[in-house]
Every structure is written in C-alpha cells, then in structure tokens.
Image (spheres, helix red, strand yellow):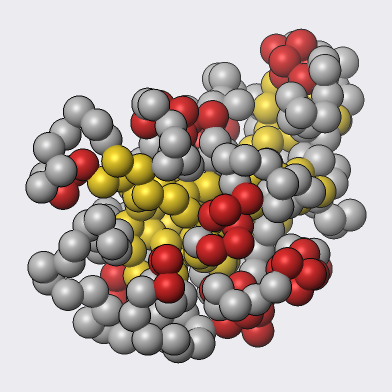
C-alpha cells in the first residue's frame, strides 16, 4: 500500500535525474491533449488529492512522434479519476491500483495498457502496527484483511520511510487518466483533470514485517520499457515483479508524519527506536 510519500526535488532537478529535456512542454499547452507542468513546492508528507510530479513517455493516445524512454515531466492530481466518473472525488478511493488485478479492473485496465507513468519520490512511508501488549504486527489492507479496521483502531502505528540509501529518487510505477469536469466550461484549462494512481504489489520479504503491500518501484533499467506504449501485457507483468527491494534503506521516523498537518525535511530524519506511537494516520 502507498498512502503517503515525500518529494522535494524541483522541476530542473527531476528533469536531470530522469534524463528529460529542460523544455519538455510548450508554454501554450492544450490541456485536453497533454497534462500541465507546474513548479511544486517540496512536500515531505504528500497525501491523496494533492498535485504531484509524473514522468511520461510518448504522448497519450499515440499523439506525436514515437520515441523511446522518458519524454517529459508533468503535474497531476494523486487519486485516479476514470474518464467515466461522475465526480472527481472518486479519486480519493483510487490512490492505488493492485498489480494483481490492474489488467482486468475496469477503472484501471485501459490506463494500464496505454497511459503509464513514473511518480518520483524521495521516499514513501509505511506504518507498522504495535499492539497494546507491545507485539509488532505488519499492517494490512482492507482488501485482504476483513479485520483491518479493528486491528488498526486497537494499535499504535510506527512509521517508516523507505528510500534509496544514496538519495536517488524512487520511481514509483503509476497510471494516469484524463477526466472532463462537466461543471467547468470546456475552454477553461481547469475543465480537464489529469490524475494518477500508484501501482502496488505484495511486499518483498525485506519489507513484509512493516506492511503486507508496497508500491512497485521501477529500477532505472526498466524505465524505457514501462513508459513505452508498445510494451506488451506479458512484459508489463514481468516489470511489475522487478522492484529492487534489496537495494532500499528503511528508517523508523518520527510519528509527526502521522498527521498530514506536519511537513518538512525533518519528517525523513531517523527517529529513536523507543519512540511511542502518535495520533491517527491517514490509514
């Protein structure tokens, strides 16, 4: 599961990290055909519904020349809003897409085939449950655990950040969609909402003691194939199994991250192992 992450790099830094051209998007971009690019402030506690950066390959719907590899950087709303949705708020329930079912679920399957992206992150957060008797339990998700809410309510929550030890950006696998807001005039750029979701998978053994799920992280060598719209379903399924979890660093961090009101680089600082649980989290 991925419900919170950190991303502090600016546009230029991300363009350099992902090998993107500096002038990737025309100033007068048509928001119906191509998502915008805005300069976002560093955010160390990104929650669903916020604007995030996304790296795209060739243009969606096949527009433009065919080129391989990362093409451009854009900003989108985190929380996928399918094209058929009646309300943008459905996105709050679609922040993640399960890799096991993404090729078949109506809300995700078309985006999976045609609109894939990479979502840069300094780190992502996961919460481990600590029972009232002090026992440590891996967090679960409502999809797999019918007692998820009850277990969460009775436990403290210990947050961790997962990242590369050399501070390279993580490239979370994602999908994106375009939605037309019927309440906004068509010539208004705000009429077109570009949104995304993080793809998750079963946690690797190195991380399963924290949470049973984790986001799919694409290693650099897989970026081109993931972003190429010509990549077939079988190869995509293989790529979803390639998260390099053995390369990650894992730090227990302050329970300040439990509240989305808190934000700043200190949230990524390793915390004392004796720290108690804090207030309720987004989960």
Taking the image as shown, residue 100 lies to the left or right of residue 105, namely right
Query: Which residue is painted at 22% across and 82% down in the image?
Result: 23
Residue nearest the viewer, comparing 16 with 105: 105
In front here: 229 or 7? 229
Q: Looking at the rendering, which quadrant does residue 74 occupy?
A: bottom left
> Where 146 sits versus 107, above or below?
above
Tell me residue 17's x, y (percent): 44, 80
Position of residue 2 in the picture relative to residue 104 (left or right): left
Locate residue 278, reporting x and y percent: 58, 23
Q: Quadrant of the N terminus?
A: top right
Q: Position of residue 24 (x, y in %)?
A: 27, 79
Residue depicted at 60% across the width and 57% down the height: 112
Residue at the spot 61% in from the left edge and 73% down from the top edge: 226
Q: Is residue 236 above or below residue 212?
A: below
For residue 250, above or below residue 101:
below
Q: Is residue 251 above or below residue 274?
A: below
For image coordinates 70% across by 52% down, the residue present is: 103
Q: Quadrant of the C terminus?
A: top right
Residue 249 visible to an observer of this rendering: no
Residue 234 seen by the camera: yes
- How many numbered circles are shown? 0
| Relative depth, front residue between 206 and 74 | 74
């Amino acid at each position: 599961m991925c419900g919170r992450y950190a991303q502090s790099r600016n546009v230029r830094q991300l363009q350099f990290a992902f090998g993107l051209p500096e002038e990737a998007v025309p100033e007068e971009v048509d928001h119906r055909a191509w998502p915008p690019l805005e300069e976002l402030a560093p955010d160390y506690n990104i929650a669903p519904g916020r604007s995030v950066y996304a790296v795209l390959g060739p243009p969606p719907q096949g527009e433009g020349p065919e080129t391989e590899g990362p093409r451009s950087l854009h900003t989108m709303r985190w929380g996928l809003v399918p094209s058929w949705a009646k309300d943008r708020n459905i996105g709050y329930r679609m922040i993640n897409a399960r890799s096991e079912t993404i090729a078949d679920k109506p809300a995700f399957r078309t985006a999976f085939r045609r609109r894939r992206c990479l979502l840069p992150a300094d780190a992502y957060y996961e919460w481990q449950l600590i029972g009232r008797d002090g026992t440590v339990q891996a967090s679960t998700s409502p999809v797999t655990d019918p007692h998820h809410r009850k277990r969460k309510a009775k436990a403290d929550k210990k947050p961790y950040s997962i990242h590369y030890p050399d501070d390279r950006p993580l490239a979370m696998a994602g999908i994106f969609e375009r939605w037309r807001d019927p309440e906004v005039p068509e010539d208004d750029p705000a009429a077109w909402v570009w949104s995304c979701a993080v793809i998750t998978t079963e946690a690797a053994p190195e991380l399963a003691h924290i949470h049973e799920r984790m986001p799919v992280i694409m290693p650099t060598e897989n970026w081109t194939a993931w972003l190429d719209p010509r990549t077939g379903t079988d190869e995509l399924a293989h790529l979803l199994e390639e998260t390099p979890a053995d390369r990650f660093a894992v730090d227990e961090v302050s329970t300040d991250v439990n509240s989305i009101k808190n934000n700043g680089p200190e949230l990524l600082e390793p915390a004392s192992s004796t720290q108690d649980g804090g207030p309720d989290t987004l989960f």
